Image (cartoon, rainbow, N blue to C red):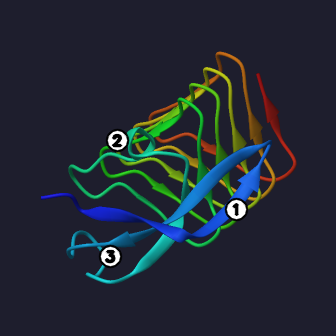
Amino acid sequence: MNKYELIKTETRIINGKTLYRIKALKSFGNVKKGDIGGYIGAEHNLSHTLSAWVYDDACVFEKARVSGKAKVSGNACVSGSAHVYENAKVSGYVFVCRSARVYGNAQVTEAAFITRNARVAGDGIISGNTLVT
């Protein structure tokens, strides 16, 4: 069974791409059945396994992916072919794009910009007005 569905009537347009708000179809992690999440472009952007979730007004689109137990929240955007996975947390006005990876127990917060082939891993913490490339 899928853990979420796309709400086709709640959309936003980013860079010419239509994104759809998500709704939990079952409880998992700290998400309860019926909870409304953030926005994704398509189902390949958010895994249906484990407890990965997109919260608030965060968005994931293009070929980007959130999986494992990762959490993307606030106004964060994950795009390009970026991947946020394992136990990583991305929150605030953060951009993770191109081929960047955030994984392990890493946390990226506030107004950070993670791009190109950058890797934030392990117990790494990136915050503030930071560019990692």
Q: Position of residue 82 (x, y in %)?
A: 57, 29
Give the foreground label among 1 and 2. Answer: 1
Q: Earlier in the sequence, mark 3 or mark 2?
A: 3
Q: Callout 1: 10 Å neighbours few (<14), some, many (20+)?
A: some
| Image vertical order of residue 4 relative to residue 102, above or below | below
Q: Amino acid at mark 1?
A: Arg
Residue farthest along the right direction in this orientation = 129
- Mark 1–mark 2 contact, CB under 8 Å? no
- The residue indicated by pointer 2 is 86
Element class at badge 2: loop
From the top left corner, tell me how far across and down residue 93 is, in percent. Answer: 77, 58
Question: Callout 2 environment at 10 Å: few (<14), some (14 to 19), or many (20+)?
Answer: many
Q: Earlier in the sequence, mark 1 or mark 2?
A: 1
The residues bearing labels 1 and 2 have C-alpha atoms spaced at a distance of 27 Å
Name the spot of residue 6 as percent of width and height, x first: 42, 62
> Tag 1's secondary structure?
strand
Q: Residue visible at 67% across and 23% down?
A: 98
- Name the foreground residue: 59 vs 10: 10
Q: Residue furthest front?
A: 9
Of circles 3 and 2, which is in front?
A: 3
* Amino acid type of the residue that numbered disc 2 sits on in the rendered structure: Glu
The disc placed on residue 12 is: 1
Where residue 10 appears, as percent x and y from the top left, is 58, 72
Q: Residue at x 39, y 72 (%)?
A: 23
Q: Amino acid at mark 3?
A: Val
- Point out the residue furthest to the left here: 1
Q: Is residue 27 above or below residue 52?
A: below
**Quarter of the figure that contains the N terminus:** bottom left
- Tag 3 residue: 31
> Residue 125: which numbered mark, if any?
none
User: What residue sits 26% from the left and 81% below the top?
Assistant: 33
In this picture, residue 60 sits left or right of residue 45: right
